[in-house]
Amino acid sequence: MPALTAFSLPSWIESRTRAVDRALDHFLPKKTVKPVTIHKAMRYSLFAGGKRMRPALVLAAAEACGGSTQAAMPLACAVECLHTYSLIHDDLPSMDNDDFRRGRPTSHKVFGEGMAVLAGDALLTQSFEIAAQAMGWPRYSHQDLIFELARAGGSLQLIAGQVADLEGEGHRVSLNQLRYIHERKTSALLCCSVRFGGMSANCSATQLKALTDFGYHVGLAFQVIDDILDVTQSSETLGKTAGKDVASQKATYPSIVGLEQSKRIAAALTAKAYAALKPFRGRAVALEALAKYLLERDR
Ligand code: GRG
């Protein structure tokens, strides 16, 4: 009888992260390609040591649906490029004005503000170029893939979250409004990531619905934890400026409901994410492990 091998998340993450890094390196213009400054700037932020959680979710969802890493990889790289663009722009002086991200000086600190804007723009465009290189599946066409990415990154989701965030500054923000921001700013792209994984495996409508539900809840939990870590961790651990939310009087879960209640809310959201995986009947091992890891993470 073959020995049962226990699933190890650390080694799963390590091997998938290495594969994602190799694929990103393949998809992106080399830093010697003209104009070299922009390609250096794009690569500087992309290979700065992010957690690669969105690509991991794409690949884990693909596995849950019986798909392959190879087929899902362009979509995993596309979401990471879009995510990195949003971080570069979020750090700009005209937005959050941050000097430190992924453990290094932010793009505008190194390349200047104009080049950082362009590096973000280029990564956003690059994400669509990469997504267009996915193979397309009987149930999901290229049109579906491009629509999915545009919807998650557009003015109804990611940008809407940032708009509400900017407009909320200096005002009293209710818990409902904060949830609206989190749904758009964070949950939308995590949701898109797991949906992409399912699509790359030509998943059924039931599976896609389950992944959507999972992504929504895990995305909200992810942002509540992000709010908590801003208060409880050091800049060194986070690789970005800690305590920024308090300093800028930003509405967060801890500032509205307190730290302990925030932890309970994150745990409850993660429980809902687990429950959404029921249709996979135990086959979504990596997704389950990732949800637990995201809840317990310290950076
Ligand atoms: C288009 C300017 C502009 C902004 C879009 C999403 C967004 C709005 C800005 C991103 C900034 C931000 C703090 C978003 C919240 C989501 C979040 C917690 C991002 C950090 O994600 P991690 O922790 O980062 O996965 P790494 O560096 O590990 O990839």
Image (cartoon, grey):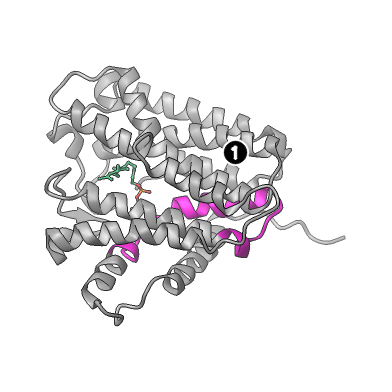
Amino acid on which disc 1 is placed:
Leu
How would you classify the magenta stretch by its main secondary structure? Answer: helix
Q: Would you say residue 296 is visible in this rendering?
A: no
- Pick the residue in front: 45 or 2: 45
Q: Quadrant of residue 232?
A: top left
Classed neighbour count for the residue bearing mark 1: other residues with Cα under 10 Å, few (<14), some (14–19), many (≥20): many
Q: Residue furthest front?
A: 143
How many marks do you count on the picture? 1
Quadrant the N terminus occupies: bottom right
Residue positioned 52% across, 68% down in the render: 19
Please name the residue that numbered disc 1 is placed on: 211
In percent of the image, x 52 and y 56: which residue is there?
A: 75
Query: Quick check: 117 left or right of 211?
Result: left
Q: Is mark 1 within 8 Å of ligand 1?
A: no
Instruction: Classify the position of ligand 1 by quadrant: top left, top right, bottom left or bottom right.
Output: top left
Q: Which residues are magenta?
A: 45-72
Closest to the observer: 126 or 101? 126
Residue 251 screen position, x and y as percent:
23, 26
Picture coordinates of residue 188, whole percent (x, y): 43, 38
Q: Does residue 252 show up?
A: yes
x, y percent for residue 28? 39, 71
Q: Vertically, is 267 above or below 70?
A: above
Identify the element where label 1 is drawn: helix
Counting from the top left corner in percent of width and height, residue 120 is at: 27, 57
Q: Quadrant of residue 186?
A: top left
Magenta stretch holds residue 56: yes
